[in-house]
Image (cartoon, grey):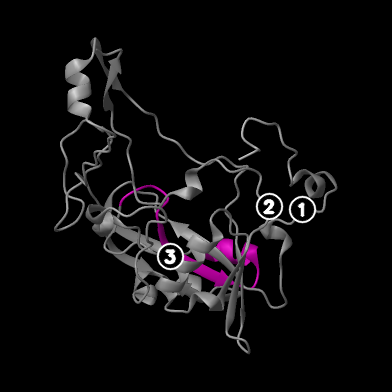
Amino acid sequence: MTFVGRSLPRLEDGALLAGTGCFAADVSFAQQIHMRVVRSPYAHAKILSIATGAASAATGVVAVWSADDVSDIPPIDFRVGRIEQLEPYRQPILAKDRVRYVGEPVAVVFATDPYLAEDAAELVALKVEELRVLVDADAEPHAFDVSQTTAIASVRKEYGDVDTAFAMAHAVVALDLSIGRHSGVPLETRGAVAHFDAALDILTLYGAAKVPHANRNALARMLGREPTSIHLREGHVGGGFGASAVNSIPRTFSPASVQCVLGGR
């Protein structure tokens, strides 16, 4: 641990300063297909239909997928840690039955050109029945789906004998804290390029950032492949701000009640 407390040279600066960094957009292959995500403009709604016919017929479009086309792929797993109560709330690859936040993926368009994919994505027609929106973290929970509510789980983590520490403390200060929403910023790009070598049966992903081994194992489980058949090549990003380290499940940070132990006898 000799590096703790010392200023160390940054390893990535040389390539970035010389203009030789490799971002996801710098990786391309012959006959590459480009994907555009169609996202929900609704915060909470029941999906009645997703019309993809016009998009499928558009120039350069190779395929258009909605939830039915990826029904065999399980929801996105949580990357770090596992809490059993959260399992029913995992993010599906594409929204099915409901959308629960603005920007939730509902379809993807594949085309021979990124601009054609973008144009075709505008042709996907999402018909919904808007539902009640929960915007206040202090509000009473309501339905998440037919069997779950928005009261997901209460997780308590502690160290030592907390009750005794509070009982013996010289003073206890209780605070109600409101934590604002957090989102990624433009510097942290969300690009990736996938290349499948059929002869070797190797799927290589370029642009993956953070914990590549955990991401590889998660993808292997979801796609039903051996981990050794998936290679992740991590490239440069403009910065890492934490938002891509968590699952995309809809979330609201609730006000937290915090008690601090001061002193003790």
Q: Amino acid at mark 3?
A: Ala
- Residue at mark 1: 21
Q: Are marks 1 and 2 in contact (CB under 8 Å)?
A: yes
Query: Which label lies toward us, 3 or 2?
Result: 2
Q: Position of residue 9 (x, y in %)?
A: 75, 38
Give the mark nearest the N terminus, 1 or 2: 1
Distance of label 3 from label 2 (alpha carbons): 28 Å
> Circle 2 sits in a helix, a strand or a loop, which is it?
loop
Read off the magenta span: 100-121
Q: Amino acid at mark 2?
A: His
Q: Is residue 62 visible?
A: no
Looking at the rendering, which quadrant does residue 182 occupy?
top left
Q: Amino acid at mark 1?
A: Gly
Residue at figure coordinates x 69%, y 59% from the top left: 25
> Circle 3 sits in a helix, a strand or a loop, which is it?
strand
Residue at figure coordinates x 21%, y 41% from the top left: 154
Distance of label 1 from label 2 (alpha carbons): 6 Å
Q: Nearer the viewer, residue 113 or 11?
A: 11
How dense is the environment of label 3, judged by Cα within 10 Å: few (below 14), some, or many (20 and up)? Answer: many
For residue 149: magenta? no
- Residue at mark 2: 236
Can you tell which mark lies on residue 107? Answer: 3
